[in-house]
Amino acid sequence: MKDKKILLSEKEIPEKWYNIMADMPNKPLPPLNPATREPIGPDALAPIFPMGLIAQEVSTEKWIEIPDEIRDIYKLWRPSPMYRAYNLEKALDTPAKIYYKYEGVSPAGSHKPNTAIAQAYYNKQEGVKRITTETGAGQWGSALALACNFFGIECEVYMVRISYDHKPYRKVMMNTWGAQVFPSPSDRTEAGRKILAMDPNSPGSLGIAISEAIERAVMDENTKYSLGSVLNHVLLHQTVIGQEAVKQMEMAGDLPDIIVAPFGGGSNFAGLSFPFLRLNFEEGKKIRAIASEPASCPKLTRGQFRYDFGDTIGMTPLLPMYTLGHNFVPAPIHAGGLRYHGAGILVSQLLKDKLIEARAHNQIECFEAGILFAKTEAIIPAPEANHGIATAIQEARKCKEEGVSRTILIHLCGHGNFDMGAYEAYFSGKLTEHELTEKEIANSLAELDTPMIG
């Protein structure tokens, strides 16, 4: 196939991260102290994060230099390839042109090492001995285990129970890189014990696992916490993806009309879309960016924009976000990385301002999309990635119905080689659907006593 693969050289790995905050017409509201409801300053985050990352979290500088030591490690898999999905286009009989940026070439098999390496680097710079974190499907935990191994830092991972059970080889992967992995909720923390007392069979959630990891971090001055999504500095690090993709689309002589990426907390979506949104801000382009989320955890499409905690127990500052409520425990779908109650504040503000879009898909629809992709493009996608593929297929079919050609760019954020249990469940007819009722969402949000916005 002509020009199927679009590659860059090592010299074209970005030298700076792009901070979309500098270009946003409306800056996000500040995080609040839960007790006083007053805006917090950087010092409030110091018990959890190193100052190097806190400075990035609050920065409004447009470009932030990537240290050479981080770029040298990036060279193990960056720049990542982009492909033209000719076979998928043919199968859909669509006039649309479909491209995908593939992050499954990283050692951990997903986009997550882009920020894991950076976070481990800044922790090492400040003498941190141990990092705690949560993980849903295991992609983030794997990435941080890899990064901590590079920098000689201990890694302690709290893995959402349902994914811990569904994806045992992700745990083995983390163990191989030296991390300790515990199913969450666990009996190692007060937060975990509280949840288990209420529900001994809890499937867990990212919010619960975050509570456990933060609790462990604040108990030891030599330990810090690391988050794989949601926060500004995490989304910042992922913009290497979109910057490369802009260059690759230029090489292809094309520009996306539509960008699609899965959505859990925001790092996946932001990584690809933010550098293209920069073209909208700077050059007046009209590129649409669509975040694809599960119908069983639809914070962007059916949640409420308000202040809420980033974790279940309430250990984080109050963040201005689209949320289903921090007590919300999503259904145990196989896309474990998307089972999060809230959305990052940058993405939330962009959605509120109608600068991006959101769409929800049910589980079976996503696996159907992923299997079609695997049959046509050969790569078996992670269940999370299947959400973006499902949206892209919808848009490609719409092009056929309307008789127009549009260029669609998908973020294929990782492979599904450790997710065969999920595909087996699909083929055996064991996958179930769970779409929330309005009453369930209303009941979850009714439990909040945090400030409303707007």
Image: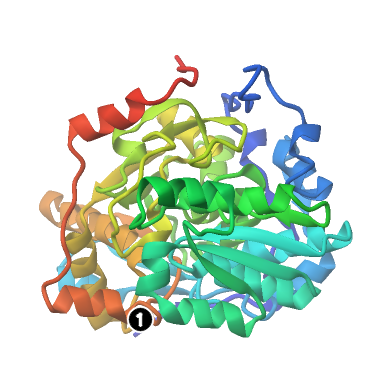
- Percent position of residue 428, x then y: 13, 78
Instruction: Characterize the local packing of mark 1: few (<14), some (14-19) or many (20 or more) Cα atoms within 10 angstroms.
Output: some
Residue 366 percent coordinates (x, y)? 23, 62
Q: How is the image coloured?
A: rainbow
Q: Nearer the viewer, residue 377 or 215?
A: 215
Describe residue 427's horizontal placement relative to residue 335 as left or right. Answer: left
Front one among 382 and 449:
449
Q: What residue is rendered at 11% in x and 73% in y?
A: 429
Q: Is residue 384 left or right of residue 247?
A: left
Q: Give percent across and percent down for residue 203.
A: 35, 58
The answer to whether residue 345 is visible is: yes
Residue 173 vs residue 146: left or right?
A: left
SS class of the residue under badge 1?
loop
Q: Position of residue 402 (x, y in %)?
A: 14, 49
Task: Name the residue located 64 percent from the left edge and 36 percent from the top edge.
Answer: 21
Residue shown at the point (34%, 85%) measured from the top left: 1
Amino acid type at image mark 1? Ile
- Residue shown at 67%/80% (left/top)? 178
Q: Nearer the viewer, residue 19 or 337?
A: 337
Q: Quadrant of the C terminus?
A: top left
**Rendered view: 166 above or below 210:** below
For mark 1, what is the residue?
A: 379
